[in-house]
Amino acid sequence: GAVVSQHPSRVICKSGTSVKIECRSLDFQATTMFWYRQFPKQSLMLMATSNEGSKATYEQGVEKDKFLINHASLTLSTLTVTSAHPEDSSFYICSARGMDGVAGELFFGEGSRLTVL
Amino acid sequence: AQSVAQPEDQVNVAEGNPLTVKCTYSVSGNPYLFWYVQYPNRGLQFLLKYITGDNLVKGSYGFEAEFNKSQTSFHLKKPSALVSDSALYFCAVRGGSGNTPLVFGKGTRLSVIA
């Protein structure tokens, strides 16, 4: 299957700083990537849909100014958590759809665990 | 609106016994259905999907799932469970049009006991 690489896998930062998480599709082009957030022992919550060359589409309740998403190329999307606070600590997972289009499964990165002190 | 229900938070099964992880869904139009598995502190791994065709879908690691349109279900099954199958399993659905994202169930934790 297709490979999605996510970096960093773990990051610890101080409150008030910004953190960038990268998501790369390694062997295919992804016009659309999805960013999810997962709280302990809970399901994945879709944060936003990242579209190459255009603005991301955010889900209701997700602050677009806090979670900046950039999809500058067909293989890279980034999520920047700005002015991070302890409540932003979570497991962030990106995904990209395979080449089968809307019928294709999503391929997921390994996730990034953010801890804000 | 799309939704997925996984009614069991936890499923326990003895090694060697058959396992079932339940999933029901609600979607407009034809559903695209998926099962994923997550190991601790890892991303999700794709197991199998139903798009069209045979109702019984076979996937990775010996798992299979049966699409039942009348019951709007897509239960995950395996004839003989392994301890290494212990993980968190997610069912997901997407309506069959447009670039809609997947909607995930809350997950079911499978514990296979030796």
Image (cartoon, coloured by chain):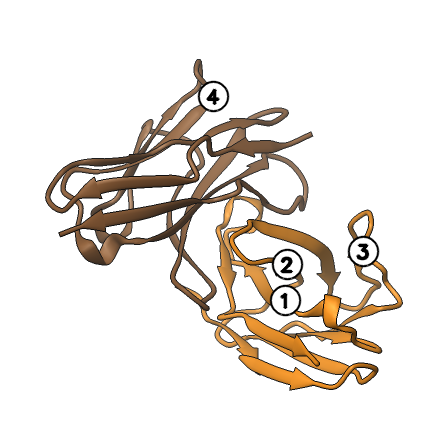
**Front residue of B43 and A101:** B43
**Residue named by callout 1:** A90
- The N terminus of chain A - image quarter: bottom left
Query: In the rendering, at what x and y percent does residue B9 appear?
Result: 43, 39
Q: Where's residue A104, x and y in %? A: 50, 49
Question: Given the image, on which type of amino acid does mark 1 rest?
Answer: Ser
Q: How many marks?
A: 4
Tell which subunit mark 1 falls on: A
Residue receiving disc 3 = A62
Mark 4 vs mark 2: same chain?
A: no
**In the displayed image of the protein, which residue is found farthest to the left?**
B16
Indicate the amino acid at tag 2. Tyr
Which amino acid, mark 3? Val
Q: Which mark's residue is nearer the viewer, 1 or 4?
A: 1
Q: Quadrant of residue B95?
A: top right
Q: How many C-alpha atoms fall within 10 Å of the one at disc 1: few (<14), some, or many (≥20)?
A: some
Residue occupying image coordinates x 27% and y 41%: B12
Q: Helix, strand, or loop for circle 4?
A: loop
Label 1, label 4: how far apart the Cα atoms are: 32 Å
**Residues at marks 4 and 2, CA–CA distance in whole angstroms:** 25 Å
Same chain for labels 1 and 4? Say yes or no: no
In the figure, is residue B84 to the left or right of B104? Answer: left
Identify which residue, B71 or A16, lies in the foreground.
A16
Q: Which mark is residue B72?
A: 4
What is chain B's hue in the picture?
A: brown
Asked if B51 appears above or below A111 in the picture, the reply is: above
Q: Are marks 1 and 4 in contact (CB under 8 Å)?
A: no
Label 1 vs 2, first from the N-terminus: 2
| Residue plotted at (17% across, 36% down) | B18
Q: Secondary structure at mark 1?
A: strand
Residue type at the position of mark 4: Thr
